[in-house]
Image (cartoon, helix red, strand yellow):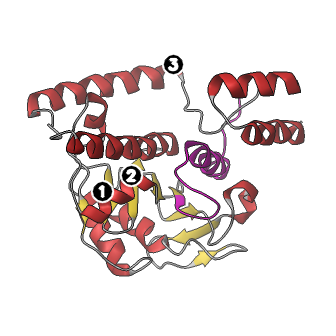
Amino acid sequence: MARVSVATEIIEVGLGLLEAGLVNETAGNISARLPDGEAMLITPSRRDYRLLTEADLAQVDLASGEAQGRWKPSSEWRLHAAVYRARSDVQAVIHHHAAWASAVAVARKTIPVLIDEAADIGPIPTAPYAPSASQELAEVAAAELARDVNAVLLANHGAVAVGRDLGEAFRRAVEVERLAQIYVGATALGGAHPLDEAAVARSREFFAGYRASRAERGARAVMAPRMIGQVALQDLVSYGFRAGVTFASLLHALIIQKIQR
């Protein structure tokens, strides 16, 4: 089986973020470091995720900021580039403005490690406020992520999640929103009590082993709905009701399936 290109994965992640409710229309941005390590592919500015093609992505040099492509790169390209320069292990960056994460960012709080799954990300701090798309924002976000955490909130703005590949960054981006909701709910109920250091260490060890076993099996995260084989209209409606997925999104997946044949 041929390896899916980085560009294709970025498109899939964009659709996955839409399905997860973390972005809408043109909000947020996604990037991946290119194999040479000196440049990244990033979503373009003001382009709807539902309409993106591989040719729409912009390539940006991490050192100079020089961009190539038919569209301007996301206005937050400086943020992505700064993260890659600060973290050699990071190969993908996702930035979104989802509601719960943004609420915690407005409160300028740190989400502690509250549940086992959160150990993979670590505490999620809020970086000091800086204007959107500024070099200052890029620097404060990268400084927080350089402290061995895998997500950061941007004060009065949104969230950033990173990963060793796009699948991991996507999973963490979704998890940040869930953890923010848990944190807000627990705080409202009287207190968000974090796990102790021993529990966090055990959880990190467990999930590291789990990820390694998935890698050995060749498992790959599904970031957007996929349809295998022939799919009838009745199947779409039935699946939509059972899975709670919108009919429109399933119809979109069916159309993509037809086009790819």
Q: Quadrant of the N terminus?
A: top right
* Residue 10 falls within the magenta-colored stretch: yes
* Label 2, residues with CA under 10 Å away: few <14, some 14-19, many ≥20: many
Please give the range of residues in magenta: 1-30
Mark 2 residue type: Trp
- Viewer-closest of 210 and 258: 258
Mark 1 residue type: Val
Q: Quadrant of the C terminus?
A: top right
Cα distance between the residues tagged 1 and 2: 6 Å
Residue at the disc numbered 2: 100
Residue 22 in percent (x, y) is at: 52, 51
Q: Residue at x 14, y 27 (%)?
A: 199
Cα distance between the residues tagged 3 and 2: 34 Å
Q: Secondary structure at mark 3?
A: helix
Which one is in front in this view, the residue at disc 3 or the one at disc 2? Answer: 2
User: Tag on residue 217?
Assistant: 3
Instruction: State whether residue 158 is above or below residue 182.
Output: below
Mark 1 and mark 2 in contact? Answer it, CB < 8 Å.
yes
* Residue 67 falls within the magenta-colored stretch: no
| Residue 161 in sight | no
Residue 27 in percent (x, y) is at: 56, 64
Q: Quadrant of residue 238?
A: top right
- Viewer-closest of 16 and 148: 16
- Viewer-closest of 54 and 158: 158
Residue at the disc numbered 1: 104
